[in-house]
Image: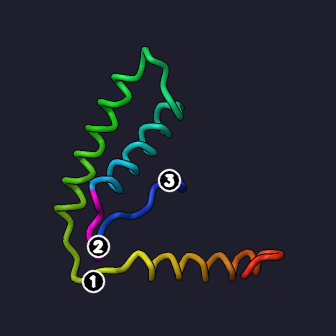
Amino acid sequence: MCRNIRPLFNFTPPASDEEVRSAALQFVRKLSGFNAPSQANQAAFETAVAEVAAAARRLVDSLVTPAPARTREAVAAQARARSLRRFGPREGGAG
């Protein structure tokens, strides 16, 4: 999976349209191999981003779970702790 695409389901507050669009943009970039498409491909690229974003929004909105909603701050803290365990404290940083 593309490292820049983050899970969007089961968060408080729910994923914003901008978060869904950003994930769609990363997905289309990965599939196409373009970070920024040429003018000739711009329309197709933007259409694909819009279609993927719409499908992703429908998916995220239709999923259900009995698990309590997570916060982005808690998930980020878990990721930092996992990184610290894996790589240790950063040199010259706050850790």
Q: Farthest top residue? A: 40
Q: Mark 2: which amino acid?
A: Asn
Instruction: From the top left corner, tell me how far across and down residue 55 is, in percent.
Output: 23, 46
What kind of secondary structure does the magenta stretch mostly adopt?
Answer: loop
- Could you say where residue 47 lies in the image, as x and y percent from the top left? 29, 30
Residue 88: in sight, yes or no? no
Range covered by the magenta-colored residues:
11-16
Q: Secondary structure at mark 2?
A: loop
Q: Earlier in the sequence, mark 3 or mark 1?
A: 3
Determine which residue is flagged by label 2.
Answer: 10
Is residue 57 visible in this depiction of the protein? yes
User: Relative to 70, is 35 on the left or the right?
Assistant: right
The mark closer to the camera, 1 or 2, is: 2
Say if mark 3 contacts mark 1, CB within 8 Å: no
Q: Is residue 14 magenta?
A: yes
Residue 65 position (above or below residue 27): below
Q: Which mark is on residue 18?
A: none
The residue indicated by pointer 3 is 1
The residue at the point 29 percent across, 73 percent down is 10
